[in-house]
Image (tube, rainbow, N blue to C red):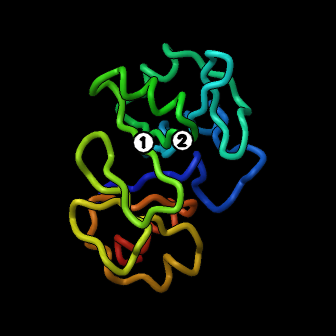
Amino acid sequence: MKIISHRGNLEGLTPSRENSPSFIDEAIDHGYDVEVDLRIEAGLLFFGHDEPQYEINEKWLYQRRKSLWIHAKDYEAFFWLHNKGDTYQYFWHSKDEYTIISNGLIWCHDIKNHNEKCIIPLLSDKQIEEHNRIEAYGVCTDYVFKLEKKLKGE
C-alpha cells in the first residue's frame, strides 16, 4: 500500500509549512509520495490550499512528478495539467465523494466504501486508530509515521 503525505505532513498538522517546497522535499526524502495543492495565478504556478502561497516552477514540479499527487485547486491548474498529457498524476474535486485521478485510480472520500483501486484520506489521528479496513491502493494522511507503524503491527 502506498502511503501519501498530505501536503508534506508526516507527524500531524503543520499548517505553517504545508505545501511549502522544502516541506514536500522532506517528505519525499523520507521515501513518501506527497499530495500537493496546485494553483495558477497570472500564468505562474503556486502551491497553496486556500490561496497561492509558494511559487514554484515547472522544472521543480517535473523533477518530483513521480512522487506527487497533484490536487488542481482551480480551473487554470486543472487545464494546465490536462494539457501535459500523462506527465503528472492529478485530480480535481470539490465536495465529491469520488473522483478519477489522471492515472485511472480513484481518489475516494468515502472511507467506508473503497477497494484496491482507491486512495483514501485518513487525516486525523483518530481515523488512523479506528480504521481497520485498509484495502486500498493508498492512504493520504497527515500522520504518515503513525500509519506506517500501524500497518507494520507496531
Residue 107 image position (x, y, % from top left): 37, 57
What residue is drawn where x is 53% and y is 55%?
Answer: 94
Q: Which mark is residue 31?
A: none
Count of numbered badges drawn on the protein: 2
What residue is drawn where x is 45% and y is 62%?
Answer: 96
What residue is drawn where x is 47% and y is 52%?
Answer: 93
Is 139 above or below relative to 21? below
Say few, some or many: other residues with alpha carbon within 10 Å of mark 1 (under 14 / 14 to 19 / 20 or more). many
Whole-number angstrom distance, CA of label 2 to CA of label 1: 6 Å
Residue 110: name its quadrant: bottom left
What residue is drawn where x is 42% and y is 74%?
Answer: 150
Report the residue marked by disc 2. Answer: 36
Residue 108 image position (x, y, % from top left): 38, 64
Is 28 above or below relative to 141? above
Looking at the figure, which quarter contains the N terminus? bottom left
- Along the viewing direction, whichever of 35 and 76 lies nearer the viewer: 76
The answer to which of marks 2 and 1 sits earlier in the sequence is 2
Badge 2 amino acid: Val
Badge 1 amino acid: Trp
Is 71 above or below relative to 25? below
On the rendered structure, is 41 left or right of 73?
right
Are the two marked residues, 2 and 1, in contact with CB atoms closer than 8 angstroms? yes
Say few, some or many: other residues with alpha carbon within 10 Å of mark 2 (under 14 / 14 to 19 / 20 or more). many
Residue 73 image position (x, y, % from top left): 57, 41
Residue 22: name its quadrant: top right
Helix, strand, or loop for circle 2? strand
Is 20 above or below relative to 100? above
Helix, strand, or loop for circle 1? strand
Looking at the figure, which quarter contains the C terminus? bottom left
Q: Which mark is residue 69?
A: 1
